[in-house]
Image (tube, rainbow, N blue to C red):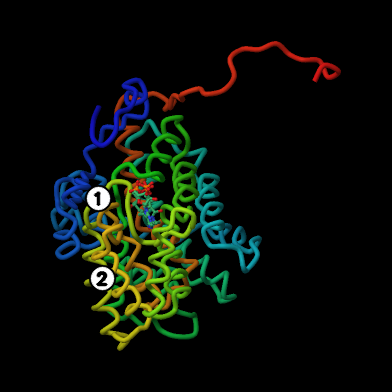
Amino acid sequence: SKGYFTYDPGFMATASCDSKITYIDGGAGVLLHRGYPIDQLAEHSDYLETCYLLLNGELPSKEQKDEFVDTITHHTMVHENISRFFRGFRSDAHPMSIMCGAVGALASFYHDSLDITDEQHRKVSAHRLIAKMPTLAAMCYKHHIGQPFMYPRNDLSYSENFLHMMFGTPCDEPKVNPVLARAMDKIFLLHADHEQNASTSTVRLAGSSGANPFACIAAGIATLWGPAHGGANEAVLTMLEEIGSVDRIDEFVARAKDKNDPFRLMGFGHRVYKNFDPRAKVMKESCDEVLAELGLENDPLLAIAKRLEEIALEDEYFIEKKLYPNVDFYSGIIMKAIGIPTDMFTVIFATGRTVGWIAHWHEMISNPYKIGRPRQLYTGYASRDYQPLDKR
Ligand code: SDX
């Protein structure tokens, strides 16, 4: 057995669960990307530099970083036919449904020319996906609000560009707020990778069949959408708005502890972290900074979130069950403060996580692998004879 669970060595050899990318110690609340602690990367690095690290295994030199940023910047535009693809969706379609379709559709633009056995082709597809996700994400929002799609600009950073494509219009010059852009970059960075969670395992399994990387990432997006996984940040805001005021917190905490009540505190708990999620700590600091910048320190949802966290950390049920705030608990408050609608939160998560999915896909496909074939424990009927209709 390895790590936190045992698995059939045959399965391990097929989907190659070994990895050098990210290490998590759930008990100690440790998260390392290629050996670098997440809090140090969040403080000193930026999202594209962390992308380079996850993909290549080492921090880039200045020249390597400049070349990588330039490559990503010059691949941020999407094929013009993609915009026509968007017009086929209802304006009220959930943006994650559009992202599943749009990212999968990217395969139709590159599939025939892509040879995933060629390292250069694998690198190009990785760069295209990282570069185009913010453009597609912003297009989901513009489609929803009926505004024209914004083209990316090559004179803006990755996160400045995303906010420009989200909130800019052709009628005015780009307005860049460095504090908000830094917060956005930190959100992308904190979501970049998280070992072999549900969506990353889906990408690896899909990739083990030799499927096109765009299709594999679309499968990861579909998995992330669930409220138990990436959909939690949207569910956190919905929960805080349902709680509505600090004096109703006890009622909802009681519900979360009631086994007969399906209600769970969204943004709390984790399959691996049985101590604090190190990303949540960084996210909370960033949340305070953004709300102060926007003069929203007294945001009522933040007051509920902070009080809920205090109560949960003192409550013996949550202590016994080792339920601490996870990465999704504060990210939604920051995104709401920036002006991002709740149904776009998981799209932002998917945008940040694309590099992690791609890094794991690339790691698996660059080494000898077989198609993944998880085995089951059969609990159905033993063999039995067919019964004709008149005998049933
Ligand atoms: C992400 O895997 C990853 O790395 C994921 C992720 C990533 O970066 O990819 O980190 C991102 O998905 C974070 C998690 C976001 N989800 C939520 O915030 C949704 C709310 N959380 C729960 O649904 C839950 O905590 C899970 C799904 C995250 C974990 O579910 P588990 O594996 O059932 O949790 P557990 O085994 O740790 O639960 C222990 C106990 C259980 O009770 P018992 O069966 O032991 O009696 O705690 C209970 C659970 O019922 N419990 C909760 C709870 N989470 C777990 N009770 C109330 N509220 C909660 N939030």
**Residue 204 % position (x, y):** 39, 37
Q: Which mark is residue 310?
A: 2
Q: Is residue 237 left or right of residue 16?
A: right
What SS does tag 1 mark?
loop
Query: Crowding near pointer 2: few (<14 within 10 Å), some, many (20+)?
Result: few
Q: Nearer the viewer, residue 284 or 360?
A: 284
Can you say whether 308 is above or below 298 in the image? above
Q: Residue at x 46, y 24 (%)?
A: 377
Q: Which residue is mark 1?
A: 274
Between the C-alphas of marks 1 and 2, the distance is: 17 Å
Rendered image quadrant of residue 161: bottom left
Can you say whether 114 is above or below 93 in the image? above
Q: Residue at x 34, y 23 (%)?
A: 8
Q: From where the camera sits, is residue 378 visible?
A: yes
Q: Quadrant of the C terminus?
A: top right
Q: Which mark is residue 33?
A: none
Amino acid type indicated by mark 1 = Lys
Rendered image quadrant of residue 250: bottom left
Q: Residue at x 28, y 79 (%)?
A: 290
Q: Is residue 41 left or right of residue 248?
A: left
Q: Residue at x 50, y 67 (%)?
A: 343
